[in-house]
Image (tube, rainbow, N blue to C red):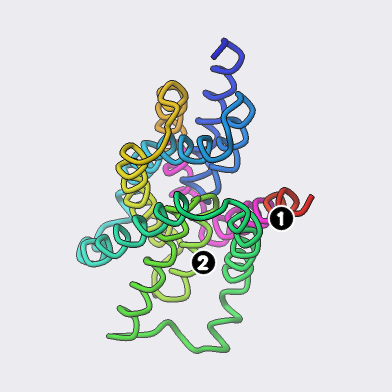
Amino acid sequence: MDVGQVLLLVAAGVAAGVVNAVAGGGSLITFPSLLGIGLPSVDANVTNSVSVFPGYVSSVAGSRADLAGQGRRVAAILPTAVVGGVGGCALLLGTPARAFEVVVPFLVLLATATLAFQDRLRALVGHAPGGRDRRVALHVVVFVGAVYGGYFGAALGVMYVAALALVLDESLNRINALKNVLSACVGLVTVVVFAVFASIHWGAVLVVAPATVVGGYAGARLARRLPGQTLKAVIVTFGAVIGVVLLWRAFR
C-alpha cells in the first residue's frame, strides 16, 4: 500500500468506529475503502470484518456505564450470539455473494423502519413481552442478528437496536450499550473463523483496526451524551442511507 491508501484506510477506520458506536453501519465506510485499494470483494469483506472488531471492543468500554445491571442478561445471550455468528460465517464462505447483495438492503431498510415506527408497532402488538416470552424473543433476535453479522455485518447495529427496542423495556442508551456488546461478540467470532478459513489482508487490518478503536471509543462516549430521541433519529438516518446505498449497489 502507498501513503495515500494508508491515509484513506486510517480515515475510514476512525469514521467507521464512530458510526458503529453511535448507530451501526460503519462497514459501509471501511468496506468500499478496502475495495478502493484493490482487494477482491470477498477478501475485502473478510478483512473488513476482522478490522472493525477492535472498534466494537472500544465501544463497549465507552458505554460500560449503560451496561450496569445487565450482566446476567449479557451472560445469558452471548452463547446464542456465538452460535449465530459461526453460522453467518459459514454462510459467507459457502454461498454466492449475489444472494447477499440482493437480500441485505431490504433487511437493513426493514430494520430501520422498525426502529422509526417502534412506538406505533408496540401499540399494534402490545408492550414488550414479559417473562419466558421475552427471554425467547431476545434469544431469537440475538441469533438472527448474529447470523447476519457473521455474514456481512453492515448495519448490524441498526438491526440490533431496532429489534431489541421492541423486545426490551429499556432506554435506547442502554439498548445501544447492549448492542455494542453483541457486536463485539459477533466480531470476535468472525476474527477467529476468518483467521482460520479465509484470506485476510493483514496489512490493511493493521492500519484500519487501531483507527476503529479511536473512533469506537469516541463514538460510544458521544452516544451516551445524546438524548434518546436524538440518538434514535441518528440511527434511523444512518440506517436509511445505508439501506438505499446497498440497494443501489445491488441493482445498478
Amino acid at dot 1: Leu
Residue 239: in magenta span: yes
The local crowd at label 2, few if under 14, some if 14 to 19, many if 20 or more residues have their Cα within 10 Å, is many
Stretch in magenta: 217-243
Residue 242 vs residue 212: left or right?
right
Residue 42 on image: x %, y %: 53, 40
Residue marked by disc 2: 162
User: Where 188 sits versus 2, above or below?
Assistant: below
Vertical placement of residue 26 versus 122, above or below: above
Q: Mark 1 points at which residue?
A: 247
Q: Is mark 1 on a helix, strand or loop?
A: helix
State how far apart marks 1 and 2 are (Cα): 19 Å
Sequence order check, earlier mark of 1 and 2: 2
Quadrant in which residue 37 is drawn: top right
Query: Disc 2 on helix, strand or loop?
Result: helix
**Dot 2 amino acid type:** Ala
